[in-house]
Image: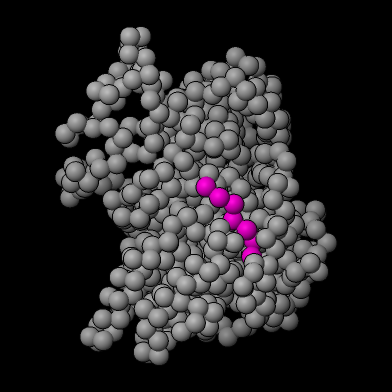
Amino acid sequence: MPALTRKEVEEIALLARLALGPDELDRMQHELGAILEHFGALAAVETSDVPAMTHAVPMDLRMRLDVAEPSLAPEVALAAAPRREGDLIVVPSSIARSDRAGEEPGS
Amino acid sequence: MSPASTAFWSVAETARRVAAGEITATQIVEAALARIQAIDGQLGAFLAVDAAGARAAAADLDHRRASNLPLGPLAGVPIALKDVLVTRGLATTAGSKILAGWIPPYDAHVVEKLRAAGAIIVGKVNCDEFAMGSSTENSAYQPTKNPWDPARVPGGSSGGSSAAVAAGLCAASLGTDTGGSIRQPAAFCGVVGMKPTYGRVSRWGVVAFASSLDQVGPLTRTVADAALVLEVIAGFDPRDSTSLDAPVPRFTDALEQSAGEVRGLRVGVPQEYYEAMDDEVRAGIARAAAALIERGAVMVDLSLPHTRLALPAYYLVAPAEASSNLARFDGVRYGQRASAPDLLDMYGKTRDAGFGPEVKRRIMLGTYALRSGYYDAYYKKAQQVRTLIKRDFDRAFQYCDVLLTPTTPTPAFRFGAKATPVEMYQADVFTLSCNLAGLPGISVPCGLTGEGLPIGAQLLGRPLDEATLLRAGAVIEATVGLGDRRPAGIGGLT
């Protein structure tokens, strides 16, 4: 299995939503490459007729009734939100605004 | 009551004495809190001590006894919880900075069960961040020392649990086991650790690591205590979609009825687990085998040919599922948030600042394995290999009732001894397969090395057959266990 390129590591970090610094990206490239080498043993195993495991222990997929049940009160559910306004959680804009770099709305 | 005198009472003895009125739950709790205060500064097992909550629960229990109300099978038993189990009103961190300061609004299912049984939650104990590790060195908060030798790790990821139980800071602890995280630290600290069958214990309210592998279980000082705690926490819970709707046997009765005999029990000895291990570990397992034979068991040599594939399969499946499970930690609804001008930047900076190196490594690995175009080569391949590993076990259990192996290749290692991630991953080499196949497993002490470090014997069983593991484990415990030997590695431990 191939070692990772720096570009691949950067792409994975973006997909994983991890803003890694240059040193961390370097280290990750090296470490993940070493770990992936150990996975080579799997590639050599013939599995064309082997089903992929879905559950280790036989179990049925359970569905619950689509009915409202008692749940956390909004105040309790929102108590840990880093930023909120009333019953809303406030997050930064999904569109970057260069004039407000480093700030969150309302800060 | 002095802190030392009740410190090593078993779960069963504590509950019996509280129920009989020989001691109050308040006295038990005060002794436990005093011992934690005296010793944990050196040990580092606890991330949070809930003195007020424990005292209130003890007072309530004592009031119930005075009023002749039912007390429950764990009456007055001080229990510490691995910090991946959420606790209402008590900080839960999963050993991570990203959850620093988070106060959960509810109790995990197993915490509800413990409280209902009369157990007293004394606090939350340390673990590798998000349960990812084999030494508790990956905790974002503190190292936890091994009570037998403070220069060594307590194992992981439930290292706070194993250290606290071994040092007599609580009678039992709950841990989680995704690839050995109950059994390996139990082996390193000389306590009993049981990973139940996948689905046997509800994970509702457990911070998820790898959902096809995670399971909650007890760490205790005796096999009988593991049976008692498992009896309380096991059972169907509709809130966990993987919870098994199967009857929970009276494990404690099964132990009593067997009376230390395992006549006719067929114990499988899988050759792949005996190829590479420390000589003193090998000698310990030989003692455990001899003990089982002496009590009527028959040894069966057999092979689990796909064992060597368990480590790579596990380190694909677990990180892949972790990368998905940990997507929820994004700084929006709870936990820490980094300041950033836009949402994408906020996610990235929050997660970069909040997660430690091993967690980031596994998220990266898992994201890589699940990427479009790579899924078949990695995750699907690993799940196919899991089927092969499961078939090995299915075949083995046609010829035997349990499997006997070492829990770990070596006794507890020193802090910093594992220089690379792959070296650390290999600490789990004997425990991973059990999770991949969904089987129950137990680690039971089987003596000490010449340096005075505990050795663990692992027993693996058929799905839902924890009772047989407990019976066989009790034989090992009674014959070659640690008896009254206690750790002396931390000052003041007697």
Q: Is residue A93 visible to the viewer in this orientation of the structure?
A: yes
Q: Is B154 displayed left or right of B64 in the figure?
A: right
The percent position of residue B10, horizontal first and vertical second, equals: 51, 79
Residue drawn at (47%, 35%), measured in percent from left and top? B354
Q: Report the magenta residues as a range.
A: B141-147
The percent position of residue B101, horizontal first and vertical second, equals: 38, 45
Q: Is B487 displayed left or right of B437 in the figure?
A: right
Residue drawn at (32%, 13%), measured in percent from left and top? A100
Q: Is residue B123 magenta?
A: no
Q: Is B419 displayed left or right of A53 in the figure?
A: right
Q: Quadrant of residue B148?
A: bottom right
The percent position of residue B17, horizontal first and vertical second, equals: 42, 87
Q: Residue furthest right?
A: B279
Residue drawn at (68%, 33%), measured in percent from left and top? A35
Closest to the observer, B3 or B267: B3
Q: Is B422 displayed left or right of B360 in the figure?
A: right
Residue drawn at (63%, 83%), measured in percent from left and top? B261
Closest to the observer, B443 or B243: B443
Locate the C terminus of chain B by quadrant: bottom right
Q: Taken as a whole, is the magenta stretch helix, strand or loop?
A: loop
Q: Is residue A59 visible to the viewer in this orientation of the structure?
A: no
